[in-house]
Amino acid sequence: MKIRSHKELDTYKIAFDTSMEIFQMTKKFPKEEMYSLTDQIRRSSRSVSANLAEAFRKRKYPKSFISKLSDPEAEAAETQVWLEYAFACDYIDENLYNQLYEKYDQVLGKLVMMGLSPEKWSY
């Protein structure tokens, strides 16, 4: 059975759900972080699934698809950096940090695999 929508991708589901976890988590961040760390981590985490949706729409052009997959990869890595800051600032505990960081490692791995086999995703 062929995947017809980005919403059917495990990668998308993990990225979307994890960005929602981050949204809930950041509600507890200090108010002085509202326009810095809070905004940055929310933006980058949401961009992973949004950019993956864009890439998926370009899948009939393998080179464009592969190129566009670099955007959600970059956003996932950026989100990991913001998670490091949140942990270093004691806004999140080590357990939550490790859990969320690992989810983005999963996303990154899946994105790389998609880029290595673009023919699996074309229609």
Image (cartoon, grey):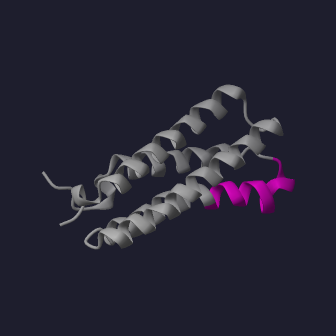
State the residue at coordinates (44%, 68%). 68
Prevalent SS, magenta region: helix
Which image quarter holds the C terminus? bottom left
Q: Is residue 25 left or right of residue 108?
A: right
Measuring from the top left, give residue 112's x and y in whole percent.
42, 50
Which residues are the magenta region?
30-43
Q: Is residue 31 magenta?
A: yes
The number of discs equals 0
Of 26 and 2, the residue lying toward us:
2
Measuring from the top left, give residue 41's x and y in whole percent.
67, 54
81 is higher (above) or lower (below) than 74: above
2 is higher (above) or lower (below) than 58: above
Measuring from the top left, give residue 69's x and y in whole percent.
44, 62
Q: Is residue 8 magenta?
A: no
Of 85 and 17, the residue lying toward us:
85
Q: Is residue 54 left or right of residue 43?
A: left
20 is higher (above) or lower (below) than 46: above
